[in-house]
Image (cartoon, rainbow, N blue to C red):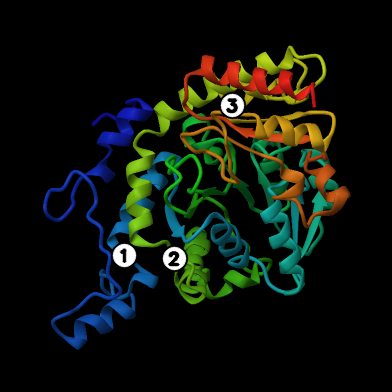
Amino acid sequence: MKEECGFNTKLLHGKYTKGFGQREILPPISQVTAFQYESMEELEKVFAHKSMGYAYTRIGNPTLAAFEQKICALEGGAGAVSCGSGMAAISSALLAVCESGDEIIAGSGLYGGTIDLFHDLEKLGIHTIFLNGLTKESVEEHITEKTKVVFGELISNPSLTVMDVPAVAEVAHNAGIPLFVDATTVTPYIVRPLSLGADVVIHSTSKYINGGGNAIGGIIVDSGRFPWDFDKHKALAEYKKYGRMAFLLRLRTDIWENLGGCMAPMNAYLSCIGVDTLGLRMDRICENADALAHALDAEEDITVSYLTLPEHPFHEYVEKELNGYGGGIFTFRAGSKERAFRIINGLKYALIASNIGDLRTLVIHPASTLYIHSGREGMEAAGVFDDTIRVSVGIENKEDLVADFLDAVRESRQG
């Protein structure tokens, strides 16, 4: 297969789709706890990492490996580690490079669960500096000797701020610091952060990669390019001999194994199936989101935030960094919490649910759910207000979605 083939062709015919033991067209589900060997000598070599093989699913499984190889190839990475959830992926990646006394620089407009995680890391002595806008200038201003990683979402959920990955990567690299990017909301179909200068890309695979809302998971993809300074990143010192692959080796053999955050084989299989339609789904989702956001923007008494709207502060990034796509999420403000609830409750086709990236359109009031522990200042930094509605657009017929949302908005005025 030619490497220059299109995204969807690569998904279905890439080298990671072949070579299964019984010539299956999909990876078999190795739904087992442990793997047997003919002799203790063989198993000893596997445990000592002197021989290829699987011993225990918590430390390796062929179904997980097949999924990891597929996403790694899509992102253009050197290696990948799958995890039990998106949060497990973020926490594992950060704990692989940070120790007590270290600092993380992060954007403030993050997913609420990620913000909660950073607060939990404080109890381990790992401090996070939240910046209102993760830019070249703001990152450069806040880097100290304690800074070990810069972390941000490429398109933040739900504030829809876009990280200028090449610019942030440049200033981080000048200081000897890696850039970790959560690319859940963009997927490798829209943009590959590693090609823009990021060092590690993280996904909650529960979202767009899986697509069907049937399997929780996460994945970490390492570029294998970052020149680790082992005097600076002491957490990786034991893996110094592996050079630029030190992060990936520590992640898999220390953090992933010891914390036990592996993905379930069935979830890896379901995500392998789901990701095969990623390109088709993202085209339809982004088309629908654009149509729905523009239709709602024409209503005078609500305020819509979506990247393809000309007045959006990050509109230029649609072409500059996102290859013409605005993504599948937008928010709008209804004027009051009560009206927001009326609109949500009045929808026929949108499901009230806390996920994103589903085939189905999902809607939620983030202030009373996802950001319930963040406080007003934290919520507003993330672009969340009492009257904010977040919409994760699905693949329904866009005409039906537009009619449904317009009906709900107009009927809510009578409340």
Name which residue lies at 51% across and 44% down.
207
**Alpha carbon separation for disc pair 2 and 3:** 31 Å
Q: Is residue 109 visible to the viewer in this orientation of the structure?
A: no
Direction from residue 371 to residue 319 in the image, left or right: left
Mark with earlier residue (1, 3): 1
Q: Residue furthest top?
A: 298
Horizontal and vertical percent position of residue 104:
74, 58
* Real-space CA distance between mark 1 and mark 2, rounded to the nearest whole angstrom: 10 Å
Q: Element under label 1?
A: loop
Percent position (x, y) of residue 220?
A: 50, 54
Q: Nearer the viewer, residue 119 or 343?
A: 343
Q: Are marks 2 and 3 in contact (CB under 8 Å)?
A: no
Q: Amino acid at mark 2?
A: Cys
**Is 154 situated left or right of 244 in this image?**
right
- The amino acid on which the numbered mark 1 sits, given as a three-letter code, is Asn
Q: Which mark is residue 334?
A: none
Q: Earlier in the sequence, mark 2 or mark 3?
A: 2
Q: Quadrant of the N terminus?
A: top left
Residue ranking furthest to the right: 377
**Label 3 is placed on what type of residue?**
Leu
The answer for how far apart the CA atoms under marks 1 and 3 are is 34 Å
Residue 262 disc label: 2
| Label of residue 61 in the image | 1
